Image (cartoon, grey):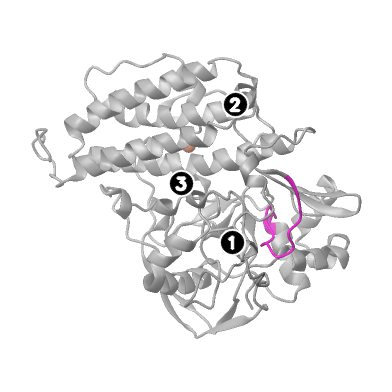
Amino acid sequence: MITAPVAPGTTRLETLEMSLTERYRQVRCFSEALCAPLETEDYGVQSMADVSPPKWHLGHVSWFFETFLLVPHLPGYELFHPKFGYLFNSYYEAVGERHPRPQRGLLSRPTVAEVYRYRAYVDGAMERLLNQRGQEREIAALVVLGLHHEQQHQELLVTDIKHILAINPLRPVYREDLGREDLGREDLHDPVGASIPRPPALEFVNIEAGIVEMGRDVSGLEARFEDFAFDNEGPKHKVYVGEFAIANRLVTNREYLEFIEAGGYRQPQHWLSEGWGTILKEQWEAPLYWEKINDEWHVMTLGGLQPLNLDEPVCHVSLYEADAYASWAEKRLPTEAEWELVAQQQWSEQANELRDTGNWVEQDCLHPQAFQGNQSGTCIHQLFGDVWEWTQSAYLPYPGFQVAEGAIGEYNGKFMCGQRVLRGGSCATSVSHIRPTYRNFFPPSTRWQFSGIRLAR
Ligand SMILES: [Fe+2]
């Protein structure tokens, strides 16, 4: 029930307060749950410039609520700490100067305990703000943005924690229960000893030429969490897509290993020039986290070092590697328009099933899973969840895209240069955070995200 007064000139949103407050609590709690298995020493490590210490993520997402909601909109709000704005501003020029990103791992203070106190302080003030003004569309829209922002950082927490533990020679385990060989393979428990389902044969599904209405019209004022889309998903626009074919499943470790064993990493003809330069410079010979022990491939997971499961989708490859593999296989990567054409149709028919059965962070595997035949009714498997799928499309503004005014306008638009689009979400993405129009983007050399390969032709 809404009892708080509604400010003049604002739109009253029935029942918004309750649902948004509940969602706020849920999202905030999940960030802390993801960090619960960490030791205090893990919280401060920055294993490379792209990785942020878990402590920084926990502080930064709280700073976002403090800066964009509490300071401007909660009368009488006092900052938790006058210098946290400098420490926890990520990239917002309009908000002021900030601590250099590559030096986030040098900070022993604030302590982990102080960061958790900061979170609790912000949460207390946010409850007051939601109680007082949660029904105003402008406030609700900023809270919704803040929650989706925190969900993005939850995925980064998973990938950053994995990297932090993986570079440690002790190969620490994030959670012992994730290391079970049969994780997610319920069929192995079959008392009659039924054989383990294998991924289906790689096939290509023909898609007729047509016009796809890409993206969403985004008002920037989505006051319901479930209605949210980032500004980079709009405006909605029509794109003609010629006839093409898309793979029925993701490329597996088994297939990628064939590429490695055929000398793929030693044959420049398959590689983009930048990619070839990168693998020589970085001495890449396999995906990130692959490790050969006694001539057997292993892979680092959040459950520790595991034998490579050949049936799982290949993961932690850069765009360069995805593109080289496609070239070697005499195929190509899909464009984001092609991907979205297929995804929109599948989502419109099976959204509930895809949410229920997809390998999302809520599934709690935190690792891509071998196809288990759990997507009945679809012939294009694992389009959502498991691994982000590299596309061949550059991350560019859609026609008519306009950067919002103010600091919030810095969220997406200023990164539309030198990056490629990935689609579909991963085993570290929240199911309530994904949709067919969602555009993720990273530089082509990025490997520490859960990124994989779907072929097209
Ligand atoms: Fe952020």
Quarter of the rendering containing residue 263: bottom right
Which of discs 1 and 2 lies nearer the camera? The answer is 1
Closer to the chain start, of discs 1 and 2, is 2
Q: Horizontally, is 131 left or right of 104 in the view?
A: left
Q: What residue type is labelled 3?
A: Asn
**Element on which disc 2 rests:** helix
Q: Horizontally, is 51 left or right of 133 in the view?
A: right
Gap between marks 1 and 2 measured at Cα: 34 Å
Residue that mark 1 sits on? 186
Q: Are marks 2 and 3 in contact (CB under 8 Å)?
A: no
Q: Where is residue 406 in the image (x, y as percent from the top left)?
A: 35, 37
Disc 2: CA contacts within 10 A as few (<14), some (14-19) or many (>=20): many
Quadrant, the C terminus: bottom right
Q: Is residue 287 visible?
A: yes
Q: Which residue lies furthest to the right in this view?
A: 294
Q: Horizontally, is 5 left or right of 360 in the view?
A: left
Q: Which of 138 and 193 is in front in this view?
A: 193
Residue 412, disc: 3
Q: In this view, does 90 lie above or below 201?
A: above
Q: Where is residue 241 in the image (x, y as percent from the top left)?
A: 49, 78
Q: Which amino acid does label 2 sit on?
A: Tyr
Q: Is residue 38 magenta?
A: no
Query: Which residues are drawn in magenta?
Result: 305-319
- Residue at the image point whose x is 35% and y is 45% from the top: 404
Gap between marks 2 and 3 measured at Cα: 27 Å
**Element on which disc 3 rests:** loop
Mark 1 residue's CB less than 8 Å from ligand 1: no
